Image (spheres, rainbow, N blue to C red):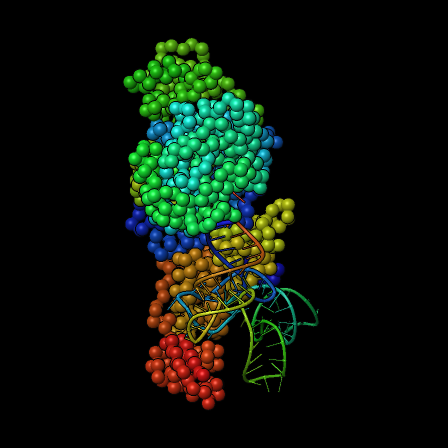
RNA sequence: GCCCGGAUGGCGGAAUCGGCAGACGCGUCGGACUCAAAAUCCGAUUCCCUCGCGGGAGUGAGGGUUCGACCCCCUCUCCGGGCACCA
């Protein structure tokens, strides 16, 4: 290492000063306009900060510091998404409690983040595992419960034998667990479910008004998967039952040649003919064993069995066979489809395999098609009133006919499923519910002043187990937080029960109806005391992150999840930045909770994140994803040790566009280090004192004023558009020009420092001080540019002949067209290209370009 | 399979209302300083022909529109991401 500026000392020095002075504290309510910048808070893993974390944080920090300098009251907070499976697995391996382990990880993350010198208001730090935080997560859950949006259901769920845990749909990828890539299987378990589907339309429509990346909106739309179609009833021959199918292609109704039910369809038992019962039972059994991986594996081809019963076509009365096939999913639509093999790829494949009839009803193809025609078209073979209509018109006619017979109606379906909200784990928020008998539920719900009625829903929530019904009683506010009990065994049970179920003293309680008190079981009930069992499932990791953006507004508030006064001022984040991997999970769940909180009056904004940005991924030096196994992981601590936090900040932003995926280059950071050293040496002498080059009264040349003011403009615009790489390059260009001058105005130097400050705050503060400036550079308004200084009197106009560059002219700006063309024609370099040729056309783009078209 | 996004020097990347391609930085080469090295500073650096002046080619490939295309249109290749029997 050569002569470096003393980044170690000055970075520690300014971080200390900022902390002591509370420079970045964001006061509630203020005359200034507010600006709320939010980072996706990290999961504090045992591995410590990754080089990718500071990328997003630096970006938001630059924006925060810039907005501050532009006169905004900026809120830039940080916290910890601290519940999660890794801490629990670590506990199983080491015996160290998740709480202790997570605490250590948080310490490390905090100190690593603080070393970056971010303008964070640390007094607002939050953690999802704090009792005073999850108390309100529980409160929101109870509100959902009260409003009928949280319920229990015995349902097939993804069970991972390896993790011994139930996984949400989103945590299962191609039949394997997202975390750990273990195989998963179906199991029937009692689960808590949140009715996110009730918000499907609002979640969809709300997207229109959001300033989000298109790809993320697209993903959410696809996830919600709204489709408009028709439900059609097919009577079953010799039966009172009917098969209801859902289709988006009612126009192909005349091409239906058979029906298919999902193997799980409840009608199967009722309508299967005895002769087919055994084969059907076998097929259903086979399907149940399959994971969705096998079931959805297209390569394996279609399977299915007939059930003997026949359906009756609602318009033609034709009798068609009914089949069971696992290509029909029980969880979508009605779990039954009408098969139109001529116009659907899947039906076609199935029909081919089982030699079922194929009837074309969308023309104009002739004969039996080689391939199904799946687009819209013009109807044929469909009879009077339909043939010749296009698909759209035909749908209308067919729906009208069905409605006339009361055999069909328009219907809207979604791919979105309700959110499976319980986990059989220890390290999560306890669900604040106790279970009581039917009689006791009746008694408690009748007690007029019982606190247990605070969150009681209109419809009771219950489940049945070995013939006994248990009823859900919500804990009252006075019992919150429901604290996670200390246990010594974090293993889940093989039966799918949470480790909490082992804490018998915690699980078995008695509740006092009149007062809302809860005590450990004594066996002495009566006098308003009822025996109860606590819910032992915990919430998924997504819960805490659904509303953290609100808790920052009033992190210590004990009276409410969000203090209404603070909420009225800060509202919601003006800018939200984080990884694209959260496009559908966190970002959809958080929108759901926020919309719900809006409905119950907790917040005054309809959407949580009006503007969202995804930073790209930083790859290893070899261009592949950083991973321990590849040995290409860059440790931010090392980089700060070697080059300083300012250099790391600057370099991460200089690598390329913020949203791009870009490889780290340990050579490249040298360029940034050199730049910072040149800055240091331009301002300061060897001794560290301010350089004598600076003059208080100094008239800069027009050229310097031009580059200075256009740099101010570019830096401002680039920050506002998150183009930090080009902003930094402009600062380099500016310094290159300034360095060529023997002297400089003090004001020019100070402007340079102010432009640099959001990116490299420590060095900017230090030089600011050594330039004898009072106070923090952060307190000064961001420089403005003078448009007049940017406009130039002389411009370069390039001259082309037939579009090929042949020369250029230096002329006064806004010279009239004829004069420019005359000068161009006479130019020494242009003339030879024009001589003896006819000029067909002359193009002049003012102040930019001349093009002669010659024959 | 379907839907997005991308492809620019040795490398990361600039430049898109259609108007000088390669800003800025890395690397490399040459020079200054030095006993020497490091550091620093100065210069060169898309490729080809040329001592030079200059000329030719060039933004993944091929075609098109235009006075003019990295930019717009069509076809294709490769890379990245998302969805994946959703009827």
**Quadrant of the frame with the C terminus of chain A:** bottom left
Name the residue rendered at 41%, 31% in the picture.
Answer: A312
Q: Which of the two residues, A307 or B58, is positioned nearer the viewer here?
A: A307
Question: In the picture provided, is A615 more to the left or to the right than A230?
Answer: right
Question: In the picture provided, is A720 more to the left or to the right than A491?
Answer: left
Say above or below: A582 vs A456. Answer: below
- Residue A22 visible? The answer is no
Q: Position of residue A199 (x, y in %)?
A: 36, 37
Q: Position of residue A496 (x, y in %)?
A: 53, 25
Q: Which of the two residues, A799 or A443, is positioned nearer the viewer here?
A: A799
Residue A452 image-quadrant placement: top left
**Quadrant of the frame with the N terminus of chain A:** bottom right
Say above or below: A183 vs A756. Answer: above
Say above or below: A828 vs A54. Answer: below
Q: Position of residue A141 (x, y in %)?
A: 39, 30
Name the residue rendered at 52%, 25% in the picture.
Answer: A276
- The number of numbered discs placed on residues in the rendered structure image is 0
Q: Which of the two residues, A606 or A134, is positioned nearer the viewer here?
A: A606
Name the residue rendered at 48%, 48% in the picture.
Answer: A367
Q: Position of residue A603 (x, y in %)?
A: 32, 39
- Residue A851 visible? The answer is yes
Name the residue rendered at 40%, 75% in the picture.
Answer: A848
Q: Which of the two residues, A271 or A77, is positioned nearer the viewer here?
A: A271
């Amino acid at each position: 290492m050569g002569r470096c500026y003393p980044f170690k000392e000055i970075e520690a020095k300014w971080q200390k000063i900022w902390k002591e002075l509370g420079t970045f504290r964001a006061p509630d309510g203020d005359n200034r306009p507010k600006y709320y910048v939010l980072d996706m808070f990290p999961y504090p893993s045992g591995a410590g900060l990754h080089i990718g974390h500071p990328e997003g944080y630096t970006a938001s920090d630059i924006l925060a510091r810039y907005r501050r300098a532009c006169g905004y009251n900026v809120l830039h907070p940080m916290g910890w998404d601290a519940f999660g499976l890794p801490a629990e697995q670590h506990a199983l391996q080491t015996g160290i409690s998740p709480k202790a382990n997570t605490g250590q990880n948080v310490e490390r993350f905090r100190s690593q983040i603080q070393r970056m010198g971010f303008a964070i208001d640390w007094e607002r730090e939050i953690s999802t595992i704090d009792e005073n935080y999850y108390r309100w997560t529980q409160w929101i859950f109870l509100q959902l419960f009260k409003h009928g949006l949280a319920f229990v259901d015995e349902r097939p769920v993804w069970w991972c034998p390896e993790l011994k845990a139930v996984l949400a749909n989103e945590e299962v990828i191609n039949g394997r667990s997202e975390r750990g890539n273990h195989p998963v299987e179906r199991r029937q378990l009692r689960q808590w479910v949140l009715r996110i589907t009730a918000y499907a339309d609002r979640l969809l429509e709300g997207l229109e008004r959001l300033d989000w990346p298109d790809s993320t909106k697209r993903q959410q739309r696809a996830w919600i998967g709204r489709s408009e179609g028709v439900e059609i009833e097919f009577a079953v021959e010799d039966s009172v039952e009917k098969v209801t199918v859902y289709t988006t292609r009612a126009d192909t109704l005349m091409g239906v040649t058979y029906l298919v039910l999902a193997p799980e369809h409840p009608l199967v038992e009722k309508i299967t003919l005895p002769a087919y019962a055994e084969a059907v039972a076998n097929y259903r059994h086979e399907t149940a064993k399959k994971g969705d991986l096998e079931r959805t594996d297209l390569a394996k081809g279609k399977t299915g069995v007939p059930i003997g019963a026949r359906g009756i076509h609602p318009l033609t009365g034709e009798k068609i066979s009914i089949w069971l096939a696992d290509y029909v999913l029980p969880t979508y639509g009605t779990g039954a489809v009408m098969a139109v093999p001529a116009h659907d790829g899947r039906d076609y494949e199935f029909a081919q395999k089982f030699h079922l009839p194929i009837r074309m009803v969308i023309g104009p193809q002739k004969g039996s098609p080689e391939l199904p025609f799946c687009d819209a078209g013009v109807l044929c073979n469909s009879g009077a009133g339909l043939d010749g209509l296009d698909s759209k018109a035909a749908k209308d006619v067919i729906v009208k006919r069905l409605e006339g017979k009361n055999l069909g109606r328009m219907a809207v379906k979604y791919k979105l499923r309700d959110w499976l909200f319980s986990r059989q784990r220890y390290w999560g928020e306890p669900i604040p519910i106790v279970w009581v008998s039917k009689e006791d539920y009746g008694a408690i719900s009748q007690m007029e002043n019982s606190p247990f009625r605070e969150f009681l829903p209109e419809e009771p929530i219950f489940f049945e187990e070995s013939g006994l019904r248990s009823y859900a009683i919500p804990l009252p506010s006075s019992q919150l937080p429901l604290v996670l009990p200390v246990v010594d065994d974090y293993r889940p049970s093989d039966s799918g029960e949470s480790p909490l179920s082992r804490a018998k003293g915690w699980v078995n309680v008695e509740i006092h109806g009149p007062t809302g008190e809860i005590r450990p079981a004594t066996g002495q009930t009566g006098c308003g005391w009822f025996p109860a069992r606590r819910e032992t499932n915990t919430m998924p990791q997504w819960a805490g992150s659904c509303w953290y953006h609100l808790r920052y507004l009033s992190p210590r508030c004990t009276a409410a999840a969000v203090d209404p006064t603070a909420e009225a001022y800060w509202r919601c984040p003006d800018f939200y930045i984080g990884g694209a991997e959260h496009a559908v999970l966190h970002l959809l769940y958080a929108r759901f909770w926020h919309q719900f909180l809006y409905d119950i009056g907790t917040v005054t904004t309809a959407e949580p994140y009006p503007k969202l940005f995804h930073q790209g991924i930083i790859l290893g030096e070899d261009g592949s994803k950083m991973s321990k196994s590849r040995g290409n992981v860059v440790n931010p601590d090392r980089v700060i040790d070697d080059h300083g936090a300012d250099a790391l900040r600057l370099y991460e932003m200089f690598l390329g566009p913020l949203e791009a995926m870009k490889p780290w280059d340990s050579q490249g950071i040298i360029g940034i280090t050199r730049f910072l050293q040149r800055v240091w040496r331009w301002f300061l002498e060897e001794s560290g004192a301010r350089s004598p080059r600076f003059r208080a009264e100094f008239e800069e040349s027009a050229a310097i004023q031009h580059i200075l003011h256009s740099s101010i403009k570019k830096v401002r615009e680039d920050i506002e558009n998150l183009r930090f790489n080009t902003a930094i390059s402009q600062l380099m260009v500016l310094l290159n020009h300034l360095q060529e001058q023997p002297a400089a105005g003090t004001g020019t130097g100070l402007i340079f420092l102010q432009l640099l400050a959001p990116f490299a705050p420590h060095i900017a503060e230090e030089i600011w001080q050594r330039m004898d400036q009072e106070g923090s550079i952060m307190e000064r308004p961001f420089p403005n540019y003078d448009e007049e200084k940017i406009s130039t009197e002389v411009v370069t106009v390039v001259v082309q002949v037939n579009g090929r560059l042949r020369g250029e002219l230096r002329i006064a700006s806004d010279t009239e067209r004829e004069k420019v063309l005359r000068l161009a024609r006479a130019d020494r370099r242009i003339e030879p290209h024009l001589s003896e040729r006819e000029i067909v056309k002359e193009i002049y783009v003012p102040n930019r370009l001349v093009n002669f078209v010659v024959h």
